[in-house]
Image: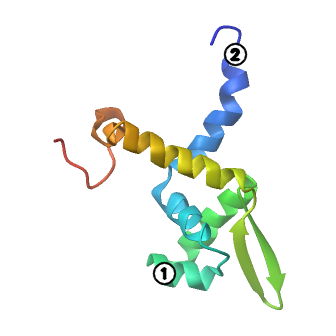
Amino acid sequence: MSGVSLDDLAPAAALFHALADPVRLSIVQRLTRGEARVVDLTRELGLAQSTVSKHLGCLRGCKLVDYRAEGRQSFYSIAAPELLDTLRSAERLLATTDRAVALCPAHRVAGTRNA
């Protein structure tokens, strides 16, 4: 990757950082099935309202998630269909590597064990 500066890579790193949190990723994965309100997400994901709202704020700030207002309710959805492609690519990469990243000490996922 000669000629690419770290500054040029910063937006991509920020994108992956936004998706690196398990709560945000669970929200995004849920929204791949269709729009949802905060109350729907809290119930389906078993998370506190403040947690869901905080993470939705982050995802909205990154323009990965958007919402539409209907009366006093907000319905959240995936803002860019490209995010779905990214998630599918990530799933294929995890399958190809036999989820080796979960075994990497630097990136160990909570709840995983060494094989």
Q: Can residue 47 be seen at all in this image of the molecule?
A: no
Q: Amino acid at mark 2?
A: Ser
Q: Residue at the top extreme?
A: 2
- Left or right of 30: which side holds 58? right
Q: Quadrant of residue 24?
A: bottom right
Question: How far apart are the two marked residues, 1 and 2, measured between alpha carbons?
Answer: 41 Å
**How many C-alpha atoms fall within 10 Å of the one at disc 1: few (<14), some, or many (≥20)?**
few
* SS of the residue under disc 1: helix
Q: Which residue is mark 2?
A: 5
Q: Residue furthest bottom?
A: 71
Q: Earlier in the sequence, mark 1 or mark 2?
A: 2
The residue that label 1 is drawn on is 44
Query: Mark 1: which amino acid?
Result: Glu
Display coloring: rainbow
Residue 58 as seen in the image, left or right of residue 47: right
Label 2 neighbour load within 10 Å: few <14, some 14-19, many 20+: few
Of 21 and 4, which appears nearest the observer? 4
